Image: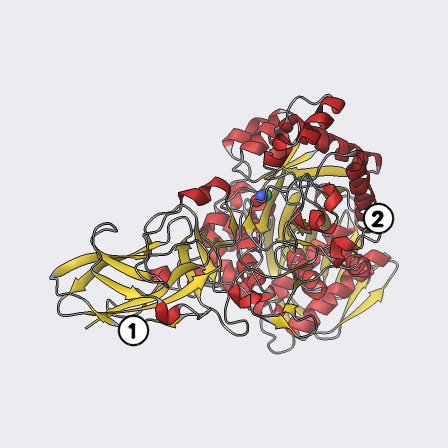
Amino acid sequence: MILACVTLAGGASSAPAETPSAVTSHEVVLANVIPRPADVTPRAGEFLLHDQAEIFAKDVEAVRIAAYLGELLESTEHITLKVVQHPVAAKARAAIALRLDPTAAGGAPEGYAIEVTPSQILLTAAKPRGLFYGVVSLWQLVSAKAASGPGIAIPAMRIVDAPRLPWRGLMLDSARHFQSPEFIMRYIDWLALHKLNVFGWHLTDDQGWRLEIKRYPRLTGVGAWRVPAGRAAERDIDPATHRSRLYGGFYSEADVRRIVAHAAARYVTVVPEIDMPGHASAAIVAYPELGVVAPPPAVPADWGIYPNLFNVEESTFAFLDHVLAEVIALFPGPYVHLGGDEAVKDQWLASARIAARMRELGVKDVEALQGYFTHRMGEYLRAHGRRLVGWDEILAGGVPKDAIIVSWRGIEGAIEAAKSGRDAVLSPAPTLYFDNRQSGGPLEPPGRGKVVTLEDVYRFDPLPAALSPDRQYVLGLEANVWTEHVRTEERVAYMTWPRAAAVSEVGWSSGERLDWSDFLSRLPAEFDRYRLLGIHYADEVFQERPSVAPYARHMSQDLKTCTDHLVLNLEDDAPLEGPRAVFLIDIANPCWIFPSVDFTSRMHLTAAVGQLPFNFQIGKDREAIHFKTPHSAAGELEVRLDGCEGDPLVTLPLAPAADNDAVTVLPSVALPEVAGRHDLCFTFTQRTLDPLWAIDWVQVSR
Ligand code: ACM
């Protein structure tokens, strides 16, 4: 559905009357711009963009931005522009002219204005970054059309545009899984083409330290490498070392300089995250003197929350200062994110040495100790011209007034921050957690089990009523691509796009212009551009999910988990090469319901099962996971009728699957004759948590 341009123009009803055909071409062209521009006024006529057209700009930076438009048009539309540096760019008779003008778009620092007339396209902005965003819009306008005849026709119009929120971010976790520097640069390109302006870069965590620090080479020499969880990886012996092959990687100083320069050219601020005092296992494995207790023997591969915290010795603060000195030298942006999330205090509470340090420092409890930690590191940053960013947990122990709070446990952290006069960024789980699946289908890549659709993201309100008294403290929003379950670059892209396009529009376009069905109408053009750019995106929003025929294979995603405690869509750890199964499983209660099976005649049951490493740090929740006791060494898959208690209807021994790290189809069994429709419940017997048995698919057939 395409809405009339007058609707898009929002208040442009004074526009001159258009012929029907001109209106149609405006609709087609404007229907392509994401995020939706603030103000569009149609004019009469059209501009024809020819191959070899000249684009004039005066200032060096404007020339560079003009050249970027040239690159975009060349690579996606096969039009070549001739970029000319010209002292009076706007007056010149160039096809396209770029000009800095302090009054353009009311002087908004990211704003721009585009005037398309039959003779010229004039793009003006107060700042180069506004010119850049204007160029992105121009590219989208052009991408509306296939070249036909003498050139690409762009309807005459005036666009005046500026964002409503200054912080429009996307965070990528490069610690849990590593992405190449080349991918990071492409990813930053894609952010910029959505007018997103903050790249949060999660560089350190329990499972990997990814940033080269010259002073402490073991951070990456040791801390960037781990043996992935599971038997398949353990059995994957590296001939060079005769040990299990290590997974990992890190960004050298040179990589980071390249990435940061690339981001600057795209007007994207990189916010590095060095997580402390928790999520610190990899650093502590590399330098055990940083820890409270003896570290694990190697960089660990579990997901979840490890208890390993940095200690609070003076030598540890000196270490962290030295690390931050290098971080500051590498990242010229104004912000450094120090994490501060999920720092469970068990180790601090149990340590006599920590208690002694707390007395020395005059700190009353472990929450206040994290506050001391945050203040101290924040002071270091302030002294070096940087602002501290932290997850909302840092509010608990007290935070510097100039800290920026990223609210992820809902929006309460942002409300609390704003009430105390602190800036906040909204990043709430689950809506802005792009490790969640975006549909419930069986072809969805691994991720968290909750389904967060494109529409869910689009309907996220970054300025809800609860924040309206303090809205000046809401800097913006940021979506997070955590990568525990997102192993490949292709999947990072898939989890990100188009949901980040929704973030872009929600962050850029003013609230009254947000219209889900209008956004949907602009998506096909967006997807065309994704294909031209080589972005592996999710097109779930346009897919009908067919219902599964009653006697066909039901994948785990087609079944219901018995409970919703900790549902994940987990990838098998095997085979090492090639496609792996993905199991939807509640790891706190592995149990599946096949609802309303029609037992019209004598039925057979076939089940395919896999084994997953239980690599989850879930603290005491682990003790609440119980299994029925096996009757054989390998255990059994038990199938019950109308509930999950009582005697099984049938039992399938797991012996045929015991030594297979990948999926095993168990021999079919005949089901006892029962009439009518019944739910079937599937559970496994097992003695230990690891490995965890999982259903891949089940089939009931005649
Ligand atoms: C977080 O998800 N631990 C910020």
Image coordinates of residue 486 in percent, x first then y, are 55, 59
Which residue bears the numbered disc 2? Answer: 329
* Towards the viewer: 196 or 18: 196
Q: How is the image coloured?
A: secondary structure
Which residue bears the numbered disc 1? Answer: 667
C-alpha distance separating marks 1 and 2:
61 Å
Quarter of the view holding residue 120: bottom right
* Towards the viewer: 560 or 472: 560
User: 67 left or right of 690?
Assistant: right
Quarter of the view holding residue 471: top right
Location of the C terminus by quadrant is: bottom left
User: 432 left or right of 623?
Assistant: right
Report the residue at 58% width, 73% height from top.
146
Image coordinates of residue 619 in percent, x first then y, are 51, 42
Residue 146 visible: yes
Callout 2 secondary element: helix
Image coordinates of residue 601 in percent, x first then y, are 13, 69
* Towards the viewer: 343 or 24: 343
Mark 1 crowd level (few <14, some 14–19, many ≥20, 10 Å Cα): few
For discs 1 and 2, the disc positioned in front in the rendered view: 1
